[in-house]
Image (cartoon, grey):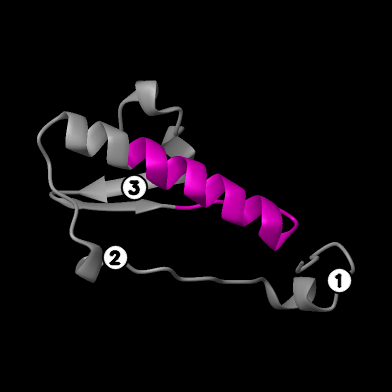
Amino acid sequence: MPACLGIHDEDNSGYADDTCIWAVANDLTTIGRLLTERAEAFYRFATGNGLKMNASKTQLLIGVVPRLLRSKHLLYQ
C-alpha cells in the first residue's frame, strides 16, 4: 500500500483487488480510531485513483487474545 496513506506495511495486506487493514491496541476506543483513520485514508486513495469501493463486500472482524479478556488493560468504553 502506498506510504502516502500513512498506513504502514505491518498494518495491511492485499492480494489482487482485496485489501485487509487492521489495528492492534490495548483498548477498543484506540482500535476504533485507528481503523477509522486507516479506512478513510484508503477510501481517499482508492477514489482518487478511480477505484470504486463496494460496501456490501466490506466486513469488520474483531479478535481478542483470550488472556486479554481477563485483563484490566483491555478497556471497552
- Location of mark 1 (residue): 71
- Location of mark 2 (residue): 58
The spot of residue 33 in percent (x, y) is 60, 48
| Residue that appears at 22% across and 68% down | 57
What's the distance in space between the residues labelled 3 and 2, CA to CA?
Answer: 15 Å
Q: Is disc 1 placed on a helix, strand or loop?
A: loop
Q: In the rendered structure, which segment of residues is drawn in magenta? A: 22-42
The spot of residue 60 in percent (x, y) is 42, 68
Q: Is disc 3 placed on a helix, strand or loop?
A: strand
Against 21, is 59 above or below? below
Could you say which is closer to the camera, residue 54 or residue 4? 54
At label 1, which amino acid type do we have? Answer: Ser
Res 13 label: 3
Is 38 part of what is drawn in magenta? yes
* Residue mark closest to the camera, 1 vs 2: 2
* Residue mark closest to the camera, 3 vs 2: 2
Res 5 label: none
